[in-house]
């Protein structure tokens, strides 16, 4: 069913959560145990994801805040997007149109070669910075930026990134309880996605959502996928090894992203990227 829905679709919407990066070797932060396994120093201190991924940390303990985000910045920068990104990029070449909506902040869709104006990063992006004090528009993190993080304390050593105004900078990421998030970049991307949807939502255009690795803990992507399928002529293919369930009509695949894509993509795409079994 998934193979047919993707093959027949004229327009593809790729929706992705943290599970999309697991095949690239990145953690998915599934619960405290998953995060503490990836970051033992935080586990030793019993600091959970909601506490460290919080703008308050940049006030209370900026060294710890930048230890966490600096470590992630370096990890995302040094990680190569998995083969699933390449396969999806090949898929959309043969389609009428496409768009990517992701809750990931790693910038890997752009890194894999997808056009910047076709990506909507709903939770922000780690490769842009914003000020913790002033309202200056987000700016690109310097390519030379690196972080020296003490593995024992998970705190950053050395000088932290700063705004032109002199205040400490932070990633342009929407954190928990984040009323200081600068949404300028995200709002531009949202406007482009809305234009895209307005072109097709009241037509008979055959559309498919390929949703990969979006869980229920923070269900932003899942909710958006279900809303789109409810309001438009769109089929939902949900790929998730633990939570592939969905409303009536969902095509559920309880596998990881790369494994599932190697089975459900059109044959001409599969033959380029996946070994035949």
Image (cartoon, rainbow, N blue to C red):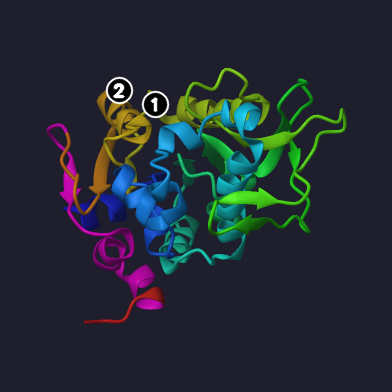
First in sequence, mark 1 or 2: give its number: 1
Callout 1–callout 2 Cβ contact below 8 Å: yes
Nearest the viewer among 215 and 68 is 68
Outermost residue, left direction? 248
Placement of 111 over or under 189, stated as above or below: below
Left or right placement of residue 216 versus residue 126 in this view: left
Point out the image quarter for the C terminus.
bottom left
Nearest the viewer among 131 and 211 is 131
Q: Position of residue 57 (x, y in %)?
A: 58, 31
Q: Tell which tag, 1 or 2, sits nearer the viewer.
A: 2
Left or right placement of residue 35 versus residue 131 in this view: left
Left or right placement of residue 150 versus residue 54 in this view: right
Residue plotted at (76% across, 38% down): 139
Queried whether the magenta region covers residue 14, the answer comes back as no
The dot on residue 122 is none
Secondary element at image label 1? loop
- The residue segment tinted magenta is 247-272
Question: Can residue 115 be seen here?
Answer: no
Residue plotted at (71% across, 58% down): 146
Q: Position of residue 84 (x, y in %)?
A: 41, 63
Q: CA distance from mark 1 to mark 2?
A: 8 Å
Count of labels shown? 2
Left or right placement of residue 249 versus residue 19 in this view: left
Disc 1 target residue: 201
Question: Can residue 86 be seen here?
Answer: yes
Disc 2 target residue: 231
Q: Residues within 10 Å of mark 1 (few under 14, many from 20)?
A: some
Q: Quadrant of residue 182?
A: top right
């Amino acid at each position: 069913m998934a193979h047919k829905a993707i093959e027949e679709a004229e327009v593809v919407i790729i929706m992705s959560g943290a599970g999309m990066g697991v095949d690239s070797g990145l953690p998915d932060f599934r619960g405290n145990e998953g995060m503490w396994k990836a970051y033992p120093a935080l586990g030793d201190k019993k600091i959970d994801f909601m506490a460290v991924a919080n703008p308050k940390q940049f006030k209370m303990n900026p060294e710890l805040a930048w230890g966490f985000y600096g470590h992630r910045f370096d990890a995302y920068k040094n990680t190569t997007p998995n083969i699933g990104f390449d396969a999806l990029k090949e898929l959309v070449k043969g389609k009428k149109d496409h768009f990517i909506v992701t809750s990931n902040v790693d910038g890997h869709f752009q890194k894999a070669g997808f056009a910047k104006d076709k990506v909507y990063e709903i939770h922000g992006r780690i490769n842009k910075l914003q000020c913790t004090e002033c309202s200056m528009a987000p700016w690109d993190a310097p390519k030379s930026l690196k972080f020296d993080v003490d593995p024992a304390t998970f705190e950053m050593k050395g000088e932290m990134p700063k705004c032109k105004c002199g205040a400490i900078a932070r990633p342009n990421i929407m954190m928990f309880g984040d009323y200081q998030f600068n949404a300028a970049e995200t709002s531009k991307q949202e406007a482009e996605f809305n234009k895209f949807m307005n072109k097709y939502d009241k037509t008979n255009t055959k559309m498919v959502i390929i949703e990969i690795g979006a869980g229920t803990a923070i269900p932003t992507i899942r909710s958006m996928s279900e809303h789109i399928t409810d309001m438009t002529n769109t089929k939902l293919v949900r790929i998730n090894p633990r939570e592939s369930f969905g409303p009536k009509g969902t095509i559920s695949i309880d596998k990881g992203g790369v494994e599932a894509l190697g089975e459900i993509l059109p044959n001409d795409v599969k033959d380029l990227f996946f070994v035949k079994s």
